[in-house]
Image (tube, grey):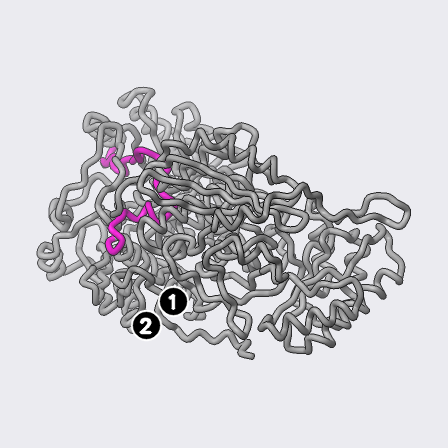
């Protein structure tokens, strides 16, 4: 009797579909300078001639993520490309040193690429493999208002609304001391007043606190900004302490969102158990990929918590995220970066289009639903990319503030 | 991609299976595809059939590929949410939709859930059967000879809230007989079937620990989570529960207590294969194993094999082993366990099993009630 349970790593069955006998032949990371940060694309080649792509971009840690992709390349080559969960388990759990955003991003890019391959092989968008479409359209919000002064930011909001956006996200805070003083509070109030006056009452305005506030200053700010009808208050405090986030939730009226700096299902568990958020923001390029996002969404669904995937990256991650958005009942809104440089937009075969209000129609292309311009990518990746991206924020006394 | 399809019909078949019935849902599409799902619920045949009838207007004319969307409409547009009758009906429907989609794409369902995470799926027998230690021992020997490496049985009769040593000695005698008959290598599980009070359950666990049991299932009734958690804190045997938890919301509290060793969602009573997959993900989040409950027909067994094949934290799969005439007769290609107690992942498009509707007519539904268990004084005991 063999009770050892030793896996023989055999190939999947392919009954009736010999075309699904797809073997990984190469895994290639591509680093693409994109101004604000570098993009990291993962290209997975197969013996079936199908190429899958995924995005693993993460600010400031390009070489580590590329290294992590190379670390698992040897494992993946020769493997059945369709055993997506199995490869996730192998890469994540056999590594012993589990987790963190570097491995999380590498595995996410790989995982997206494997879904892209399976969707293309079956001729269906990935959402069909996640239980089918649960909505007719997906709403985007613009990660977009820019400007160096409150007036410039308000002007930027007006331009975005004129372009058709119905939801905007911005951060009205610079470095804020542990207990906010009147200058910081007045500055944030003035910024939000200018924006609300500029865009009117019907535009959803989202505030990203970027973890810059302490529990005390988060409560102060939320109370001070409550009158501006904020859609959600993102990362009011740093995400390392979910109990602190839960205490902020308990004390303020604005719904709280968090999750871009939480990784894998395990990273989200305590947030849900403590009631530390109304909306979770897994980033499918960091949290472990589309299927990991699906698991996180299911756990959130059990807690009446919404999902708003984080995505300040390229149209590739946007397309991967939209596949999940169309398949989960508790989807809330999808982040979209509005100001990619033209040379980044040229990496894609087609421009990304959306409808007035920020709506996106269901994808129709198989897989993730995006085609890359490989000539443009091969040319662009010859350019030097930034190696020192590290925006820094300082308190007035010269000490480090959380960016 | 295969052509878009539309649901044109929803049929049900009830098959007499001892004191209970197997309930099947068949969903037909305009492309000639028929999906199959099981919705069995012992003692509630008519209620489940009525529920499927109530859900039919939602399905006729709908796109069968939009599985989650139809599930959401069925569950959330209903206002009166959940409950075991509704979930059992919904599961049969949901699995039939996955069957349609898999057939349309030419792939087993597990391919749509991340692919195989294991090469073979370990089963345990819902058995041995018998009233006396000797009967149980003979049945255990028979099951081990058939290839089973794991057995589950109930060594408890009706047990008072505070049981005397006699109840404990009876249980010890039965478990000892099975352990001696099966040998030390076979995994044994005991099923409390909710028959014990928390106080008695802890004493039983302590008394039975010497027999090296894999888990102790439903030591008490599952409705009150703190009681189950209290037992789990004290029991030297890992506690398993979940067959009577319905839907994802009822599993979180169990998991949050961090003491339960094994969750046992049943695909039918959970609300379908995707819902069971969600529950398995919650368990994975808490490092808890999943051993899907399945005292039903081959159809839910095969459905469970799809779930087991894609679930990293899968432990072991329950199967009914009794040689009942209706079991093999009503399906066309029942799964076959190998000589060392494992099933292969299903290997045909969709669910990979079909109902023989003509053969099913040989086993008309029965008017059945669950077996009744009574205390010595004539009062009702929990079966």
Q: Is residue A154 something that shows in the picture?
A: no
Q: Quadrant of residue A90?
A: bottom left
Residue B80's disc is none
Q: Between residues A138 and A264, which one lies in front from this camera angle?
A: A138
Residue B156 image position (x, y, % from top left):
78, 58
Question: Could you tell whether B310 is left or right of A67 in the image?
Answer: right
Reply above or below: A155 against A100. Answer: above
Residue under pointer 2: A75
Q: Chain of mark 1?
A: A
Residue under pointer 1: A91
Question: Could you tell whether B355 is left or right of A387 in the image?
Answer: right
Residue A202 image position (x, y, % from top left):
32, 21
Measure how far apart labels 1 and 2 are at the Cα level: 8 Å
> Mark 2 falls on what kind of element?
helix
Reply above or below: A3 against A218. Answer: below
The N terminus of chain A: image quadrant: bottom right
Give the magenta part as a residue range: A120-149
Residue B363 falls within the magenta-colored stretch: no
The residue positioned 28% from the left and 40% from the top of the image is: B4
Q: Residues within 10 Å of mark 1 (few under 14, many from 20)?
A: some
Q: Quadrant of residue A85?
A: bottom left
Question: Could you tell whether A260 is left or right of A313 in the image?
Answer: right
Q: Between residues B334 and B117, which one lies in front from this camera angle?
A: B334
């Amino acid at each position: 009797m063999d009770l050892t349970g030793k896996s023989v790593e055999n190939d999947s069955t392919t009954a009736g579909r010999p075309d699904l006998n797809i073997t990984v032949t190469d895994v290639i990371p591509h680093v693409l300078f994109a101004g604000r940060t570098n993009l990291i694309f993962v290209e997975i080649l197969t013996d079936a001639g199908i190429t899958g792509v995924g995005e693993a971009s993460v600010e400031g840690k390009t070489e580590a993520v590329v290294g992590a992709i190379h670390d698992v390349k040897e494992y993946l080559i020769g493997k059945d490309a369709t055993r997506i969960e199995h490869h996730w388990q192998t890469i994540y759990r056999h590594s012993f040193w589990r987790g963190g955003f570097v491995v999380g991003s590498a595995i996410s890019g790989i995982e997206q690429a494997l879904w892209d391959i399976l969707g293309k092989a079956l001729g269906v968008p990935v959402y069909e493999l996640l239980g089918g479409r649960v909505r007719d359209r997906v709403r985007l919000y613009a990660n977009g208002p820019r400007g160096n002064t409150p007036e410039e930011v308000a002007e930027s909001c007006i331009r975005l609304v004129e372009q058709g956006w119905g939801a905007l996200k911005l951060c009205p805070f610079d470095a804020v001391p542990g207990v906010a003083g009147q200058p910081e509070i007045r500055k944030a109030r003035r910024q939000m007043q200018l924006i609300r006056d500029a865009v009117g009452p019907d535009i959803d305005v989202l505030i990203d606190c970027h973890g810059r506030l302490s529990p005390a200053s988060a409560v102060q700010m939320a109370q001070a900004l409550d009158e501006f009808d904020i859609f959600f208050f993102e990362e009011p405090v740093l995400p390392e302490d979910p109990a602190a986030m839960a205490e902020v939730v308990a004390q303020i009226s604005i719904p709280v969102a968090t999750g871009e700096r939480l990784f894998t299902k395990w990273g989200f568990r305590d947030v849900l158990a403590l009631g530390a958020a109304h909306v979770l923001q897994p980033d499918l390029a960091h949290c472990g990929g589309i299927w990991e996002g699906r698991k996180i969404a299911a756990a959130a669904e059990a807690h009446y918590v919404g999902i708003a995937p984080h995505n300040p990256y390229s149209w590739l991650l946007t397309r991967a995220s939209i596949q999940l958005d169309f398949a989960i009942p508790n989807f809330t809104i999808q982040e979209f970066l509005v100001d990619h440089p033209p040379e980044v937009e040229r990496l894609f075969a087609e421009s990304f289009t959306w409808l007035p209000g920020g709506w996106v129609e269901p994808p129709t292309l198989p897989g993730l639903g995006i085609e890359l311009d490989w000539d443009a990518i091969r040319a662009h990746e010859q350019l030097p990319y930034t190696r020192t991206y590290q925006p820094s924020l300082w308190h007035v006394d010269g000490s480090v503030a959380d960016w | 991609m295969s052509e878009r399809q539309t649901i044109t019909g929803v049929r049900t078949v009830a098959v007499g299976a001892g004191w209970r019935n197997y309930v099947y849902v068949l969903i037909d599409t305009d492309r000639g595809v028929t999906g199959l799902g099981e919705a069995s619920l012992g003692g509630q045949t008519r209620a489940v059939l009525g529920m499927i009838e109530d859900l039919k207007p939602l399905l006729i004319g709908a796109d069968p590929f939009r599985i989650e969307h139809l599930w959401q409409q069925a569950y959330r547009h209903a206002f009166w949410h959940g409950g075991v009758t509704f979930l059992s009906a919904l599961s049969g429907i949901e699995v039939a939709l996955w069957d349609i989609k898999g057939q349309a794409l030419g792939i087993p369902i597990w391919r749509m859930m991340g692919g195989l995470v294991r090469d073979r799926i370990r089963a345990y027998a819902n058995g041995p059967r018998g009233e006396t230690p000797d009967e149980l021992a003979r049945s255990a020997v028979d099951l081990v000879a058939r290839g089973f490496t794991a057995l589950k049985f109930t060594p408890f009769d009706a047990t008072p809230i505070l049981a005397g040593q006699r109840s404990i000695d009876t249980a010890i005698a039965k478990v000892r007989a099975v352990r001696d008959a099966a040998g030390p290598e076979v995994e044994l599980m005991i099923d409390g079937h909710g028959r014990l009070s928390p106080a008695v359950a802890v004493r039983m666990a302590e008394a039975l620990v010497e027999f090296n049991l894999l888990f102790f299932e439903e030591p008490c009734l599952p409705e009150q989570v703190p009681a189950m958690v209290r037992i789990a804190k004290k029991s030297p045997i890992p506690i398993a529960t979940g067959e009577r938890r319905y839907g994802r919301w009822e599993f979180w509290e169990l998991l949050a207590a961090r003491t339960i060793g094994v969750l046992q969602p049943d695909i039918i009573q959970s609300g379908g294969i995707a819902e069971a997959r969600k529950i398995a993900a919650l368990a994975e989040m808490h490092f808890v194993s999943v051993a899907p409950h399945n005292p039903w027909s081959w159809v839910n067994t095969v459905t469970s094999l799809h779930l087991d094949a894609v679930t990293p934290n899968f432990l072991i799969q329950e199967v009914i082993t009794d040689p009942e005439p209706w079991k093999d007769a009503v399906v066309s290609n029942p799964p076959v366990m190998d000589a060392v107690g494992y099933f292969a992942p299903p290997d045909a498009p969709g669910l990979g099993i079909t109902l023989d509707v003509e053969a099913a007519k040989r086993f008309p539904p029965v008017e059945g009630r669950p077996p009744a268990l009574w205390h010595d004084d004539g009062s009702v005991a929990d079966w």
